[in-house]
């Protein structure tokens, strides 16, 4: 796991934790719900978190496909070609 992916996962978990706590507070203080609603709310948060995390892990990161040194070399070569023309 790359550092970028790890930071994304930690940030996503923190965000979903905050959303879960806010939802629990709303359900506990303002909206009267059945006790099973809390279970469905938690299950929904976990499913969404896992879904987003899996989607993010399958998404190809274009920055890893190109080597920075090779890209710099290509830019330099293209710049020299333009100067010669």
Image (cartoon, rainbow, N blue to C red):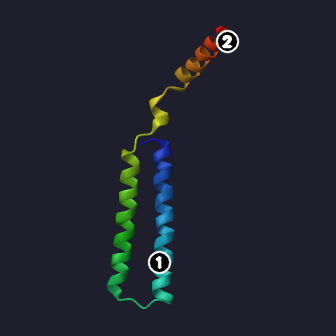
Query: Relative to 3, is 52 above or below?
Result: below
Q: How many badges with numbers are in the image?
A: 2
Query: Relative to 1, is 8 above or below?
Result: below
Looking at the image, the residue that sits furthest to the top is: 84
Residue 50 badge? none
Pointer 2: what residue? 83
Q: Residue at x 50, y 62 (%)?
A: 14
Query: Relative to 13, is 57 above or below?
Result: above
Which corner quadrant holds the C terminus?
Answer: top right
Tag 1 and tag 2, C-beta contact below 8 Å: no
Looking at the image, the residue that sits furthest to the bottom is: 32
Q: Residue at x 46, y 73 (%)?
A: 20
With 82 as the anchor, is 45 left or right in this view? left
With 44 as the anchor, is 71 left or right in this view? right
Q: Position of residue 51 (x, y in %)?
A: 36, 58
Which corner quadrant holds the N terminus?
Answer: top left
Q: CA distance from mark 1 to mark 2?
A: 61 Å
Looking at the image, the residue that sits furthest to the right is: 83
Pointer 1: what residue? 23
Categorize mark 1 by other alpha carbons within 10 Å: few (<14), some (14-19), many (20+).
some
Q: Residue at x 37, y 81 (%)?
A: 38
Which mark is first along the chain, 2 or 1? Answer: 1
- Comparing 49 with 80, the one in front is 80
Query: Relative to 60, is 19 above or below?
Result: below
Categorize mark 2 by other alpha carbons within 10 Å: few (<14), some (14-19), many (20+).
few
Q: Position of residue 42 (x, y in %)?
A: 38, 73
Q: Position of residue 84 (x, y in %)?
A: 65, 8
With 46 as the anchor, is 83 left or right in this view? right
Q: Position of residue 48 (x, y in %)?
A: 38, 63
Looking at the rendered structure, the secondary structure element under dot 1 is helix
Q: Nearer the viewer, mark 1 or mark 2?
A: 2
Looking at the rendered structure, the secondary structure element under dot 2 is helix
């Amino acid at each position: 796991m790359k550092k970028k992916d790890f930071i994304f996962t930690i940030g996503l978990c923190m965000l979903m934790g905050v959303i879960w706590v806010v939802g629990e507070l709303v359900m506990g203080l303002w909206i009267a719900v059945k006790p099973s609603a809390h279970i469905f709310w938690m299950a929904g948060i976990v499913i969404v978190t896992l879904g987003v995390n899996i989607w993010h892990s399958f998404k190809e990161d274009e920055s890893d496909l190109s080597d920075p040194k090779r890209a710099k070399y290509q830019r330099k070569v293209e710049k020299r070609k333009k100067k010669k023309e």
